[in-house]
Image (spheres, helix red, strand yellow):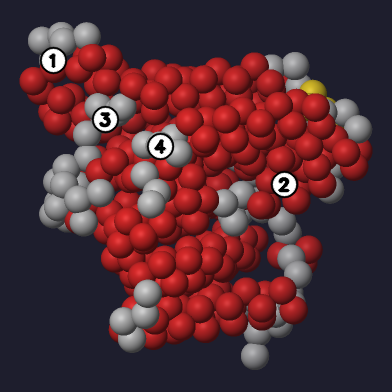
Amino acid sequence: MPELSKIDWITLAVALVGTVVTGGLQLGGVSEVAVFIVAAGVLGALAKLVGDATEHLGAKLGPGMTGVLQSGLGNLPELLIGIFSLRAGLVTVVQAALVGSILGNSLLVLGAAFLVGGLRHGTQRFGPQPARSIATLMLLAVAALAVPTLAHGLHTPADPHEETLGIAVSIILLIVFAASIPAILGGAPAAVPAAPESELPGHWPLWFTIAVLAVASIGAALVSEWFVDALRPAIEVLNLSEGFTGLVIVAIAGNAVENVVGIELAARNQADYAISVILNSPLQIALVLVPALVLLSYVVGGAHLTLVLPGLLVAVLGVASIIGAVVVFDGESNWLEGVALVGLYCMIAISFWWG
């Protein structure tokens, strides 16, 4: 048997049992709200399980490959939720969830890390140059995502071709990501080094790690579909707007648990690693997840995802990317900056309560 820590066993049990329970609730015709709530929690456990397996696999493959694996597998639940939501015609939910994932990392998770790290260790310092590089690339990615909305809102000649423009922008963003992979594999500062295998809490054999990844991926696919099936009825019963549901609830269910890692690193006074984990996540969403969903929406059926977003989504996306760049520019963080970032996230979330 593989050598698992107590937390590993708990995570594995919650993910597997939770998947079975969610399936039973779905097949048993239980209230959609109950399925919605349980599925959201199980998705978090599955994301944690994927993250743990990726870390153990990365210890065998090296830090550069770990960065690539984390960016790909870490966004798996969000990708699946996005695909099933598009097939159900929930375009507004998908758009809000993608922006919400970026906001959640750039404001909520970063702010929580600053707050926890600042309260425990005072002012924390990190290498400013890697953080500036990530923040700068994030600004460029957000600017690219805003172009189709601007072309539509300003009634330019490109306005009637919003789908073609969205496809072109998506392909370019994926090319930019592909161009960054050699730097990640080469051990660029933006990549977070994997922990040596001897330092991981329990040794996972390679066969077991791959098996966990496969099972967790299947579980994530099933639970994501059940989650989306219950999404529209739950929105109606709970009287929630699609914008708020996507921006806050779906975004948190899809990626909040994996980003607890960044807060834990800040609490351990590993500020450089914390900043890298937290800022790389929204960057990968902007460069990979968003364009991938745009392109996949023309293949999987259902509604087509365009990059023409509601004006408020574009505005808050720009604000978050600018604020993220400003707060890391000096290479220092404190608890007060954390409170301000979390407060800004709450203000934005409240502004979407009505839609």
Residues 67 and 107: in front is 107
Residue 161 seen in the current view: yes
Mark 3 or mark 4, earlier in chain = 3
Camera-nearest label, 4 or 1:
4
| Neighbours of disc 1 within 10 Å: few (<14), some (14-19), many (20+) | some
Give the residue at x 58% y 63%. Answer: 48
Residues 206 and 190: in front is 190
Give the residue at x 36% y 60%. Answer: 237
- Please give the label number shown on residue 263: 2
Q: Which residue is mark 4?
A: 354
Is the residue under label 4 in contact with that under label 3 (CB below 8 Å)?
A: no
Disc 4 to disc 2, how far (Cα)? 30 Å
Q: Position of residue 35 (x, y in %)?
A: 41, 72
Disc 3 to disc 1, how far (Cα)? 13 Å
Q: Which residue is mark 1?
A: 158
In what element is the residue under mark 2?
helix
| Neighbours of disc 3 within 10 Å: few (<14), some (14-19), many (20+) | many
Disc 3 to disc 2, how far (Cα)? 31 Å
Q: Which residue is mark 3?
A: 307
Q: Is residue 235 above or below residue 331?
A: below
Q: Quadrant of residue 280?
A: top right
